Every structure is written in structure tokens, then in C-alpha cells.
Amino acid sequence: MPQLSERLAEVRSYFAHGDHHLGYRRLLDAALETGNFDVYRATLRFCDEWDATPEADRGRTVTDRVSGLLALIETGHRPPPPAGTGPRLEAEGVAKRYHQGAFSLAPVNVRLHHGQIIGLVGENGNGKTTLLRLLNGDLRPDAGTIRYHFAPAGTAAYDVRSRIAFIPQRPQSWYGSLMDNLQFASTFAGLTGEENELWTEMVIARMGLRPYRTYNWSRISSGYKMRFELARTLLRKPQVLLLDEPLANLDMLAQQIILEDLKFLAASETMPLSIILSSQQLYEVEKVSNEVIFLQRGVARYQPGAPLDEAPEEKTALVLELETAATRDELEALLGPAGLQQLTFNGGVHILYFAPGTGTGDVLTLLGGSGLPVRYFRDISHSSRRFFVA
Ligand SMILES: Nc1ncnc2c1ncn2[C@@H]1O[C@H](COP(=O)(O)OP(=O)(O)OP(=O)(O)O)[C@@H](O)[C@H]1O
């Protein structure tokens, strides 16, 4: 996490270069981190002004106000106590077999640290939800241990559970307005009166939910329902967040915004969340995750730092994903001499496997020089994507 002064300089630079929306979000991040209700009051006045100003005029008018607010954030910021360094959640050899059906989750290890994001990837029915529910304490493991390190020994199970938030794939509907529900969530963080309102409004602003404050459940789109769930989670100030397929049913833009929000939640200086999210959106999840666990038919085939069943040489060899109108023969003729060992085609993309020693640059040079049309290119040598295409 960059120092506060660097983050504020970044905000100034976004506004100076016309990236107002990004600047606005980063400004809210910095204000939220202060935990200072005077800063929250001033920030929310700024948000009112922002909302009341037509987009075309913001550069001229609102930007002038940014410097004053940043100065207030700088003076109102109190460095938080240092966060612990050990893991927050540890699961060792956790296994599960359901009474009915043939599925079983083979022993799996998870170690989730402060401010870390772990991506849990795998196709439908491979055990992602099962593992999340075990970690959340909804299911009892048949074997193995799960330890939570964020509560002192002797803390009641209910209190431990209240510090873990689980957002299921299809969150339950709720009654009343979005604002009422979120204010209720803030009471779990012990906030009442004006503090409750300020904290709730700040999180609503940060999650882009201000226009929907009075909406009820049925009026909100899927993307904003997920952001509502995130807001509700953030308001409660949990330690660990487990999300089951948060990207399902969202368009690309909504996915990117949710992932950006997760990064913000994990990287928070004052209340860093440790996050595990399951998804089939490999590229997207890998971009924000510190580590990836790949589940296939209930077996963790790839775990961070300890690939379970791949030969060491497999890790270093180049694997590329390529979308092109070129034929298999053309690709083999061009890339064979550069060490192409195997080529598979699924009708959409080619997967190219190279002998150790071939580099991405070698292949790009050959493709560029050949004039073959390339529509998409990605190095998946270190991505769990290669398990999906294998
Ligand atoms: N309560 C249950 N009793 C018996 N089998 C179950 C139960 N819950 C899940 N299963 C089975 O366990 C397997 C793994 O399911 P799980 O929901 O964990 O997978 P997943 O990777 O999360 O898949 P999806 O993305 O489709 O939700 C599936 O075959 C499912 O049918």
C-alpha cells in the first residue's frame, strides 16, 4: 500500500489529467481510510456538489475543491496500528464427502493472510462452494482442521463467525430501502446516531450506490445488488470475506468494478480484508489474486507455491493462447523451428506448448514478421488457465 502522501498525489494527478471518475473514487478511498468523522462530513458535502454538477462542468468547478479536501484528509489521517503478519485463516487437510452422491472434496490446504486475495477457480460442480462453506463453518469437515486467527483464544464461536462474511452466489432478497438496510448493517459495527449515518453514507458513496439509496431490492440490477452486498459487508467491518461467484451474471464493466472494489477492500490500510473468491473468470480473478487454488473434481490440482501434480519442467515451459485466422499448418510451419512441441485447437483459440528455452519475445517476433493476423495473444505459462485447456 503506497504512503498516504503518494496516494493523495495520485488523486491530484487524476483530477489534473481529467480522469475525474477515477480521482473521485480514489479520493473517497483516502477519506474513508481516515476514520475521521469531520473528514467524512466534508467529503459528503463534496459528493453532494459532485452530483449536482453536470459532467461537462466538473473539471472546472469541482476540481478546485479537491485540494482543500485533500489537505483535510492529510491532517485528519491517523496511521493505524500495525496489522498482524500471520495468517488470518488456516485450513489443513480439509476434506468432505456428502451423504448423498459421489462427490468428495479431497484434502485441501488454505492459508489466507492479512489483506490477501485468494482466487478459487474451477468449472461447475468441482467443489468451490463446498470449500467456501467449510471455511465459513456452515459444513463440518470429515477430516482436517480450520483455524481462525483473528479472535483471541476463548472467543465465543458466534463472535468468531460474525467476523467472517460469506456472500453466496445468489444473495437473499431484502425488504425496505437500500439505505435502511445499510444503516442497519452499520449498527453491527457499533455505530449509532450521526456516526452511523456518516459511515453508511461514505460507504454508499464509495460503492457508487448514491443514486439508489431509496431503491428496494427488485429495482436494483444484478451488478448493483452485488455492490450492495459488498457495501453491507464493509459496513460490518469483518476480517475475512468469502465470495461465491461474485462475477456471475455481470457484464465485463461490472466485473471490473467489483474486482477493483475487492482490491480496495483487501489493500485498505485501516481495515484490510482477507478475501477468497470463487469464479470461473480466470483472467479476471488472476489479475486481482495473490494466489490461486484450482479445483478439479474435488481435488486441488494447483495451489500457491506448491503445484501438486505437475512436473517441475512443466512450470517453466512456455504455453500460449492464440486467436488467429491462420491455419494449424501455417502456425506449425512458422513456430515449429522455434520449439513448438504441441498445438491444440478448440475451435476458438489455439493453445501452443513450447519446449523449455523458447521465450514469449521469440514467438512475438516470428508472428509479427510473418504478417499472420493475430486477434488475441496471451502467455498462460503461469496461469491456472492451462488446466482448463488441458
Ligand atoms: N448437500 C449436498 N449433498 C450432496 N451433494 C452435493 C451437496 N451440495 C453439493 N453437492 C455436489 O457436490 C459437487 C460440488 O458442488 P459445489 O457446489 O461445491 O461445486 P462448485 O464448484 O461450487 O460448482 P458451481 O459453480 O456449479 O456452484 C456437485 O456435484 C454437487 O452436486
Image: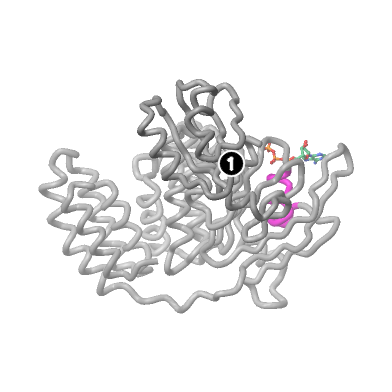
Residue 372: image location, x then y, percent: 40, 25
Name the quadrant containing residue 39. Answer: bottom left
Asked where in the image residue 140 lies, by quadrant, the reply is bottom right
Q: Alpha-carbon neighbours of circle 1 within 10 Å: few (<14), some, or many (≥20)?
A: many
Residue 215 drawn above or below residue 24:
above
The colour scheme is one colour
Query: Relative to 329, is 360 above or below?
Result: below
Question: As drawn, is 139 to the left or to the right of 387?
Answer: right
The residue positioned 13% from the left and 42% from the top of the image is 57
Amino acid at the residue labelled 1: Arg
Note whether 23 is above or below 215 in the view shown. below
* Residue depicted at 23% across the width and 47% down the height: 19
Q: Which residues are magenta?
A: 127-138
Residue visible at 57% across and 56% down?
291
Where does the image place residue 41, in percent across and percent down from the top left? 28, 62
User: In the figure, is residue 353 to the left or right of 212?
Assistant: right
Q: If the image is split into quadrants, where does the C terminus sit?
A: top right
Q: Between 144 and 177, which is closer to the camera in this rendering?
A: 144
Q: Where on the image, by quarter, is ligand 1?
A: top right
Percent across and percent down for residue 22 are 29, 49
x, y percent for residue 127 = 73, 44
Task: Residue 85: tell me if it is visible.
Answer: yes
In the image, residue 314 lies in the stretch drawn in magenta: no
Q: How many marks?
A: 1
Say which residue label 1 marks: 385
Residue 389, located in which quarter of the rendered image? top right
* Residue 171 visible in the snapshot: no
